[in-house]
């Protein structure tokens, strides 16, 4: 890892084309695949040309003819919508109403409501959020922010999970071998034509075992301007953040330091950007930074949906300016409208933030000979199982519960069977201890909750798994050895025999 701090989330479409970087000795491998042309690319020097979809047109992939419509209004609506989409974590509730108010000025039939998103029929839509380096700085095409937003299209209301992958995760990059994840975009950008987005998509698809249906590439310059346009955001800082090496605003080769006190803080754009970027001192590491980035997105969403934005034309115009040069995506207006439709009932409690880390159940370990991060299992199988069931498992993962397993029967090794099954299925629970109950005549398994109901997802999972209700301790325990105590009875032995319980 380099000593000098570098920006995480910046992008200039005019300055990154054709530039080469040196990330390894094998950065020139050619790609054999075709790059899909994005539907919309915000470039102030180019006009977007598409086709109006009208009732007399039967093509399902037609869009708007921007040459025949008022371009300033179109650009204003689209740019504003995209910045809200990005920074509000794909939950743009209320923005569609604004578009509908102006739809008659754009097209007689602006939306095809029959169209569905890629992945929607399969129950899941995955959107990649990429952040790359600031043009002119070292490592400008490295993607130091890699986040996947997954939307569950089967549940009501729809669940949303934001998954952050660390930049130092060692992954296989097609044609290049094993490198850090942030190298994927850089390798792609070194090709002619630049293919950073496509290489990043394929790398993350291979790593997580899921398809990436859409992408958004953006920069933190836009985030800073957007926060200021909103009049600032409010975040409760959990502990004081002090980073004496944080670079100066106008000279990143010089350290000016950073200090943000604990407690409720109203942050302007510059402070929010620093909060999201700092990674040294008490700021911790890349894992803490990834979580703070998600906190900033959530705070922006809260501010956007507070009603103080849509009713303020000046703020809307400022958001438009923030988005103009800072966002590239293959999401069409029709796609965005559909996203709004399927997530309009999503509440903050339906959104889960996941950051892979070195913590228990964080799935990662540190390589002994480098700064690379590796999957704890030796491969990505455990991570892929977790991702495949992310909407069910993420709430359990977030609670980070510890479990005591006791055997209350004469059948030896019963607790070990349950532990092995949980690990095999990728259930993100930490087994703090295995042992025998005081008696071996337990007929019905028991689950005791020592959290006072604070970990409901874990409680619900254990109750469903064992087919028994969760109970509270008869006598309060001040320092329990785990969050939950599971005592297995002969009913669990019967479940194993019938094949309805976990198997070894």
Image (cartoon, rainbow, N blue to C red):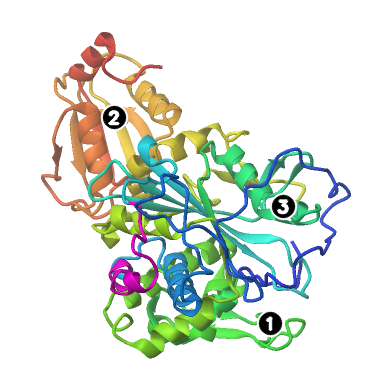
Give the SS element for disc 1. Answer: loop
Q: Is residue 322 magenta?
A: no
Dot 2 or dot 3, earlier in sequence:
3
What residue sits right under mark 2 in the picture? 406
**Residue drawn at point x = 70 percent, y = 73 percent:** 134
State left or right for residue 242 relative to residue 61.
right
Q: From which residue to which does the magenta span run?
A: 96-112
Front in this rendered view, residue 330 or 412: 330
Q: Is residue 98 magenta?
A: yes
Give the SS element for disc 2. Answer: strand
Q: Position of residue 346 (x, y in %)?
A: 27, 57
- Can the viewer see residue 267? no
**Residue drawn at point x = 51 percent, y = 38 percent:** 210
What residue sits right under mark 1 in the picture? 247
Residue density around tag 3, few if under 14, some if 14–19, many if 20 or more, within 10 Å: many
Q: Position of residue 195 (x, y in %)?
A: 72, 52
Q: Quadrant of residue 263?
A: bottom left
Q: Position of residue 66 (x, y in %)?
A: 51, 67
Quadrant into which the N terminus falls: bottom right
**Residue drawn at point x = 49 percent, y = 56 percent:** 331
What residue sits right under mark 3 in the picture? 195
């Amino acid at each position: 890892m380099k000593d000098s701090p570098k920006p995480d989330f910046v992008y200039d479409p005019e300055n990154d084309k054709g530039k080469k970087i040196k990330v390894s000795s094998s950065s020139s491998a050619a790609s054999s695949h075709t790059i899909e042309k994005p539907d919309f690319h915000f470039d102030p020097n180019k006009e977007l040309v598409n086709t109006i979809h009208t009732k007399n047109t039967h093509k399902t992939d037609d869009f708007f003819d921007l040459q025949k419509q008022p371009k300033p209004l179109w650009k204003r609506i689209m740019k504003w919508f995209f910045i809200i989409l990005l920074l509000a974590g794909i939950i743009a509730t209320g923005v569609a109403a604004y578009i509908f108010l102006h739809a008659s000025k754009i097209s007689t039939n602006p939306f095809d409501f029959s169209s569905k998103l890629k992945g929607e029929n399969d129950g899941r839509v995955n959107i990649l959020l990429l952040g790359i380096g600031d043009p002119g700085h070292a490592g400008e095409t490295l993607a130091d922010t890699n986040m996947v937003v997954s939307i569950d299209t089967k549940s009501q209301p729809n669940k949303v999970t934001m998954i952050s992958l660390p930049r130092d995760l060692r992954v296989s990059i097609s044609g290049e071998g094993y490198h850090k994840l942030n190298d994927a975009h850089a390798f792609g950008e070194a090709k002619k034509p630049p293919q950073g987005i496509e290489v990043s998509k394929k790398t993350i698809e291979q790593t997580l075992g899921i398809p990436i249906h859409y992408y958004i590439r953006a920069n933190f310059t836009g985030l800073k301007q957007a926060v200021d346009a909103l009049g600032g955001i409010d975040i409760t800082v959990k502990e004081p953040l002090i980073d004496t090496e944080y670079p100066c605003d106008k000279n990143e080769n010089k350290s000016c330091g950073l200090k943000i006190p604990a407690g409720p803080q109203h942050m302007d754009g510059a402070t929010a950007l620093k909060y999201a970027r700092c990674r040294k001192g008490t700021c911790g590491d890349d894992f803490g930074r990834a979580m703070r980035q998600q906190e900033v997105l959530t705070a922006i969403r809260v501010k956007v949906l507070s009603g103080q934005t849509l009713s303020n034309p000046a703020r809307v115009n400022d958001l438009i300016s923030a988005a103009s040069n800072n966002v590239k995506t293959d999401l069409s207006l029709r796609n965005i409208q559909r996203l709004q439709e399927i997530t309009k009932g999503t509440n903050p409690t339906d959104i889960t933030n996941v950051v892979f880390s070195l913590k228990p159940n964080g799935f990662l370990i540190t390589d002994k000979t480098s700064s690379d991060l590796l999957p704890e299992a030796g491969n990505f199988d455990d991570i892929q199982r977790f991702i495949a069931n992310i909407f069910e498992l993420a709430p359990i993962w977030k609670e980070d519960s510890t479990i005591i397993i006791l055997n209350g029967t004469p059948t030896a090794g019963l607790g070990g069977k349950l532990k092995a099954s949980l690990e095999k299925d990728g259930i993100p629970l930490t087994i703090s201890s295995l042992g025998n109950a005081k008696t071996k005549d337990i007929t019905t398994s028991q689950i005791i909750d020592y959290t006072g109901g604070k970990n409901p997802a874990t409680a619900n999972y254990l109750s469903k798994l064992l087919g028994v209700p969760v109970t509270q301790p008869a006598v309060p325990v001040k320092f329990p050895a785990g969050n939950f105590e599971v005592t297995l009875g002969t009913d669990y032995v019967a479940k194993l025999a019938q094949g309805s319980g976990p198997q070894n």
